Amino acid sequence: MASAPPTLPPIANNADVRFLGAMLGDVIRAYGGDRLFEATEAIRKASVERHRDGGDGDGVDLGLDRLGLDETLDFVRGFMLFSMLANLAEDRQGFAVEQGADLTSALGTLAEAGVDRDAVMRLLDHALIAPVLTAHPTEVRRKSMIDHRNRIAQLMALKDAGRDTTPDGDAVDEAILRQIALLWQTRVLRRERLYVTDEVETSLSYLRDVFLPALPALYQRWDRALGARVPSFLRPGSWIGGDRDGNPYVTADSLKVALAKASEAVLGHYRDQIHALGAELSISAGHAVVDPAVARLAEASGDTAASRSDEPYRRALSGIYARLAATHQALTGKPAPRPGALAGEAYPDPRSFRRDLVAIAHALEIAGGLDSGGPLAGSGALGRLIRACETFGFHLATLDLRQNSAVHERVVAELLKVAGVAEDYAALDEDARVALLRCELANARPLASRFTDYSQETASELAIVQAAADAHAAYGPQCIVNYIVSMGKSVSDLLEIHLLLKEVGLYRPGRSPTCPIMAVPLFETIEDLEAGPAIMQAYFALPEIAAIIGARGHQEVMIGYSDSNKDGGYLTSTWSLSKASTALKPVFDAAGIGMQLFHGRGGAVGRGGGSAFAAIRAQPSGTVQGRIRITEQGEVIAGKYGTRDSAIANLEAMASATLLASLQPERLSQAENSRFSAAMDDISATAFKAYRDLVYGTDGFRTFFRQMTPIAEIAGLKIGSRPASRTKSDAIEDLRAIPWVFSWAQARVMLPGWYGVGHALQAFEDKALLAEMAQGWPLFAATLANMEMVLAKSDMGIAARYAELVEDNALRGIFGTIRDGWHRTHEGLLQATGQSRLLEKHPALDASIRLRLPYIEPLNLLQIELMKRHRAGEDDPRIGEGILLSINAVATALRNSG
C-alpha cells in the first residue's frame, strides 16, 4: 500500500501579494468587465483548490474550455500580471537575497575564523568583482512593463515609510492603482525584433539609473564597515555591443554606439552632480580659509560673475562643469545638453577630473581647522562623485569583445594568405600554427593592407579591432579590457587575438611586448574544460605572453555553464566546472600569475543559475583569490538590478561571498575532500551516461523535443537580436543553450536542470556518504539546492500533456523515460537531504513556488490547446498571440526559466 503524501504547510500569503492582487482584480473588473473578472476569479479559485494540500485535483474543472479567444488573451494577461506583482512583493520581502549575505556578516564570519580586517583590506587592494550585463535573450517582458513595475516598487516604498501621498501630492494607493491600470493597458508583446541598439539602450537604463547611484552609496557603507576607504574593487561590465559570437548584427558601428552612449550617460551624471554641488557649496571666502588649489581652480574657470566673486568653490565647480561639457563634445561628437556659458578644455582622462574633485575635497577637509576636519570633511555627495569617477571613468562599464574561435581562424588565414605568409593556415597543425603566429607577433609589420579587398567577415573583424583601438585612445584603456574567445580549444586560438590586435597597434612587439587587452579563453564543452589547464600551461610558457601577463599580474579564464550543461547534463557540467577551476590553480601558481575566473552563468539552473552567493562560496578552495566576474542576463538583470535597493542587496551579496570564498579557511579536511571528490567522479560518470543516452543516443529525440516543447513558437517572441541557432541545422548540438533551456521550462519538464542525477544517486551505493556530502560540502549542497528548486517548479502531470503534442506514438514513449528519471531524481534528492518532501527545509522558497503553481497550470493548459490549434493549421492571429502571451506569462511566473 502506497504511503500517503506528506502534509503541506499552509502558504503564508504575504500582505503585499494580497494588496497588489486585490488592486489587480479591481483593474480587471474596471477595464475588462464583470464577466472577465468573474471568469478569471472562478478559474483562480478552482486552480487553487486543485493544488490544495498537494493533491492532483484531477476532478476539478477549471472552466478553461468556456473561454473564447479574446477572453483567453485577457485571462493570460491577468495571470501574467499577477505573477509580475507577486515577484515584486517577494523581492520586497527579501526572498531574493540570503541571510548573512552582507559585508558586516561576512566580516563577522571571517573574524571568528581569525581573519582580521587588515587581511580583508590587503585582498581588496588587488580585488575585482564584476557583474557583466549581457544581451542573452531570456527577458520576455518589454521595458515598458518593467518600468511600470519599478514605479510600483517605488510607491510601495513610500507606503513602507508611512507616507500617504507622493512628493507630487498624489495619494499613494491611487498612484499604485494607476500604475497597475497602465500595466493592464500596456501591450505585452514586442511587435518588432530587438536590434543591438535597443539592447544597448536597455542595458544603459540599468547602468545609468541603478548602478551609477547605487555603487557609490554601497561603497560608503563598506567604508564605514571596514573603518577605512576601500579600493574601488566592484565595477560593472557589459557584453552588449561587443559580443559578436553568433550575432551578425554586432559590428564596429554598434561597438561605437555602445561606447558613445555609455560615455554620454556617465558624463551626464557627472555634470548633474557637479551642478548640484555648485548649488550646495556656497562657501564665501569671507568666512573660510581658501585652499590655494581651490583658488587656482576658481581662477582658471573663467567665471567672472560678480555674484560669485567671493565664492571660490562655486567658481571652481563652474570650471569643472565647463570642462565636462567639453569632454562630452570630444567623446561623443555632439554638444552636451545644457553646456553652460563658460568654455573649458576637455579632460584628457578620468584621472584629471578626479584630481580636481580631490582638490576640492581636500580643501573642505582642512577648512575645519580641526584634527577631524570638521563637519565638511565627511564624504557626502562629493565623496560619492569621486567614487563614481574611480568606478565608472568616462566609459561607465568595461565592454568585453567576444567572437568564436572559428571566425578568428578564418580571418587570420585570409590575412596570412593575402600577405603571402602562409597559403593554408587552416591546414597547419597546432605546433606549426603557434610557431607561425609567434613569428608574426615578433614582427611589427602589419599584415593587412588598405589596398586589398578582404571578405566581408575579415573586413568586419578588422573594423572591430580598429574601433577598439580608437576607443582606447578616446575613453582610456579601461573601456575594453577583455577579448573573449568562444569555443577556445588551443593556444593558437589566443595568439590569433594578439595578431589581430597587433594590426591596430594594441599589441606592441619588442623585448617587453605589451597589450592592454587580455585574450580570454572560454572553455565551454566538457572536453574543453578538461583540456583547459594544459592549454593555459602551454600559453604561460611562451616568453612574450609571460611578459605581458607578468606586467598585468593576472589572467582570466572564462568557464561556460550553458554549453557544458547541454553537452553533458547538469551534474557533470557542475562537477566539470569545479574540477577545471581546481586544476587551473596549480598551473597559475606555478607561473606566479593571479587567477581570475569569469563564470558564464544564465538565469536558469540548467545554465548555471541559482543563488550567486551560494555559488561563489561553493567555489573550490583557492580559486577565487578576490577576483571574479559573473555574467548577468535577461530576466536576472531586471530581478536583481531593477531598483537601487535590490541592486545594493545583490551586489553586496556578491562582494560578501567573494570575501568569504577568498579568505575563509578550507571547511573540508584533505581526507574529506578526497572522499567527496572520488564519490563525485563516480556520480558524475553515471549521470553523464544517462544524460547522453537520452539526449544524443535516443533515436528520434530531436523530433520529440521539437514537437513536445514550444521551441518553434519561442522564436516569435522577438526577445533578442541574435538567431536561436548557430547554424541552420536543427541538431541539438547547434541549438543555443537559451532556447534549449527555455523550451523545457515552458513544458514544465526543466530537463537540463536535473536529468541524469537520479540515475546517479540511485546507483551510488554509499547513501550515508551522499547524506554527509549534502550536509558538509558546499558544492554538493548548492548543486542539490538548485536542483531542488527546479524539481519543485517542474510538473510531470502537465509535462505529460505536452508529450501528447508529439505526433508519433513510439516517439511519445520517450516521455516515459524522462518521467522515470524525474522520479529517480526526486527520491534520490529527498534521501540525500533527509527530507520528506521538496523544499521542506526551505519554507520561504517553498511558499513562493506553491503560491505560483495554481497560476501557472491554467497558463500551461491554455498554451497546449493553442499550440494544438496552431499546429493543426488554424490561422486566426489571436491563436499565435495567445501562444506568445502564454510563453511570456509562464516565464514571468517561473522567474528564472531562461
Image (tube, rainbow, N blue to C red):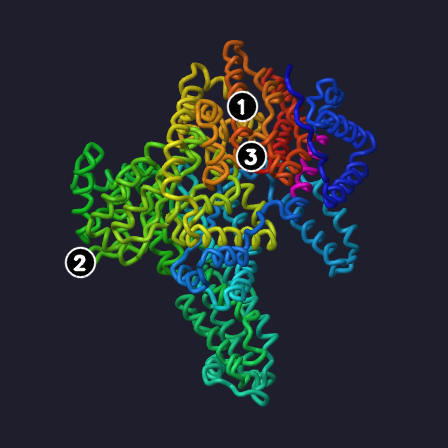
Q: CA distance from mark 1 to mark 3?
A: 18 Å
Q: Is residue 452 above or below residue 890?
A: below
Main SS of the magenta segment?
helix
Residue 568 seen by the camera: no
Kind of residue at badge 2 = Arg
Kind of residue at badge 1 = Trp
**Crowd tier of the residue under label 1, counting other residues whose Cα lies within 10 Å: few below 14, some 14–19, many 20 or above:** many
Residue 52 seen by the camera: yes
**Which numbered disc, 1 or 2, marks the residue that appears first in the sequence?**
2
**Which numbered disc, 1 or 3, marks the residue that appears first in the sequence?**
1
The residue wearing badge 1 is 822
**Crowd tier of the residue under label 2, counting other residues whose Cα lies within 10 Å: few below 14, some 14–19, many 20 or above:** few
* Residue 890, percent from left and from top: 62, 32
Is residue 523 found left or right of 569 in the rendered image? Answer: left
- Label drawn at residue 844: none
Q: Nearer the viewer, residue 382 or 479?
A: 382
* Residue 647, percent from left and from top: 56, 52
Q: Nearer the viewer, residue 694 or 273?
A: 694
Tell me where the magenta segment starts and ends, as one range.
74-87
- Label drawn at residue 897: 3
Q: Is residue 5 above or below residue 479?
A: above
* Residue 41, percent from left and from top: 78, 31
Q: CA distance from mark 1 to mark 2?
A: 59 Å
* Residue 493, percent from left and from top: 28, 41
**Crowd tier of the residue under label 3, counting other residues whose Cα lies within 10 Å: few below 14, some 14–19, many 20 or above:** many
Q: Secondary structure at mark 1?
A: helix
Q: Is residue 742 magenta?
A: no
The residue wearing badge 2 is 511
Kind of residue at badge 3 = Ser
Q: CA distance from mark 3 to mark 2?
A: 51 Å
